[in-house]
Amino acid sequence: MAKRRIRVRKKIIGTAQRPRLSVYRSNNQTYAQLIDDGSGVTLIALSTLDTGLKGELKSMRTMEAARRVGKELAERARRNGIEAVVFDRGGYRYHGRVKALAEGAREGGLVF
């Protein structure tokens, strides 16, 4: 998986106008960040452990929680003036929680 992540990362670069939406998933949690690679800054970070979402996500299954994280990330991004992103699946297959997060972000209004 490390080789796949490196290969994908060579092609995907986030800018200030179109940041990189990076996804990481552990066994229990799902994490997402909007990253400006030009300046090396994380603009927005969100996960299933976020204090604002944790109580709401506690009763959800992992796929539903990932979709909710994507939707909330899109809402925060739009509040900060970010409309479009580049999706970085982090070497994971576009399946399951990664796909659910992407679909949630699209539902929230992000374009990619």
Image (cartoon, rainbow, N blue to C red):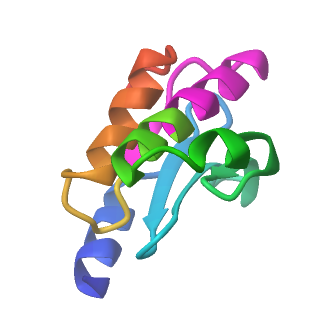
Residue 29 visible in this rendered orientation of the protein: yes
| Residue at 40% across, 53% down | 62
Question: Looking at the image, which is closer to me, 92 or 97?
Answer: 97
Drawn side of residue 10 relative to residue 4, left or right: right
Is 8 placed above or below 78 here? below
Please tell me whether residue 112 belongs to the stretch shown in magenta.
no
Number of labels in the image equals 0
Q: Quadrant of residue 64?
A: top left
Give x and y (percent) for residue 80. Answer: 78, 23
Question: Looking at the image, which is closer to me, 43 or 32?
Answer: 32
Drawn side of residue 2 relative to residue 23, left or right: left
Drawn side of residue 34 relative to residue 51, left or right: left
Drawn side of residue 80 relative to residue 91, left or right: right
Location of the N terminus by quadrant is bottom left
Question: Looking at the image, which is closer to me, 70 or 61?
Answer: 61
Residue 14 visible in this rendered orientation of the protein: no
Location of the C terminus by quadrant is top left
Q: What are the residue bounds of the magenta stretch?
A: 70-88
Which residue reaches farthest front? 59
| Residue at 41% across, 76% down | 27
| Residue at 19% across, 60% down | 93
| Residue at 27% across, 65% down | 92
Give x and y (percent) for residue 85. Answer: 49, 32
Please tell me whether residue 76 belongs to the stretch shown in magenta.
yes
Which residue reaches farthest bottom? 2
Question: Looking at the image, which is closer to me, 86 or 96?
Answer: 96
